[in-house]
């Protein structure tokens, strides 16, 4: 059963400006620890791709907060949701702290997709009720 759907789109240039204005601290505020490692690696290899990664993760967190119906209020916090990629490239969510407990108690799971193209980044999240007895 679908619990909620969230979408977010943003101009990468605006995120770049905020990143520059905060001297990079924006990434520390937004990204979880595993996301931060990926971001730093991508940023070092190609600055533009690193910022696009940051933008898609920002969009995923915004979309997720809409899908669960809470916005950016506890248990949702910027760093408590991580969007990482499986070896196949498929984006998947992981939860930290009270958000992990919240998702487990509700028996919810999130399905996420992210994309970026030149100057825009977008994410969509669908939160569903897990089927009892399922391992996913």
Image (spheres, rainbow, N blue to C red):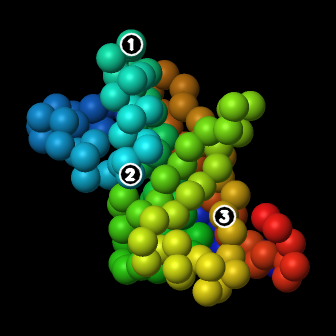
Q: Is residue 5 above or below residue 85?
A: below
For disc 2, the marked residue is 32
Q: Secondary structure at mark 3?
A: strand
**Relative to the observer, which residue lies in front, 132 or 108?**
132
The answer to whether one can see residue 76 in this image is yes
Position in image of residue 38 (x %, y %): 44, 32
Crowdedness of circle 1 by 10 Å Cα count: few (<14), some, many (20+)?
few
Picture quadrant where residue 15 is located? top left
Measured as percent of width and height from the top left, residue 42 is found at 41, 22
Q: Looking at the image, is 109 positioned above or below residue 117?
A: below
Element under label 1? Answer: helix
Residue 11 in sight: no
The residue closer to the viewer here, 114 or 45, is: 45
Identify residue for label 1: 45
Label 3, on which residue?
110
Of residues 14 and 82, which is closer to you in this image?
82
Kindly give the residue lying farthest to the bottom in the view shown.
105
Between disc 3 and disc 1, whose residue precedes?
A: 1
**Does residue 86 appear left or right of residue 57 in this picture?**
right
Which residue is pictured at 79% across the width and 64% down the height?
136
């Amino acid at each position: 059963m679908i619990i909620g759907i969230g979408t977010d789109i943003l101009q990468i240039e605006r995120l770049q400006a905020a990143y520059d204005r905060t001297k990079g601290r924006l990434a520390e505020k937004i990204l979880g620890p595993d996301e931060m490692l990926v971001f730093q690696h991508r940023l070092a290899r190609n600055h533009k791709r690193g910022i696009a990664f940051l933008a898609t993760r920002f969009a995923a967190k915004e979309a997720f907060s809409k899908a669960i119906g809470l916005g950016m209020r506890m248990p949702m916090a910027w760093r408590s949701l991580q969007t990482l990629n499986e070896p196949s490239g498929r984006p998947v969510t992981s939860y930290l702290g009270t958000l992990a407990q919240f998702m487990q108690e509700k028996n919810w799971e999130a399905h996420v997709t992210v994309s970026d193209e030149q100057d825009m980044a977008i994410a969509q999240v669908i939160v569903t009720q897990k089927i009892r007895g399922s391992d996913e």
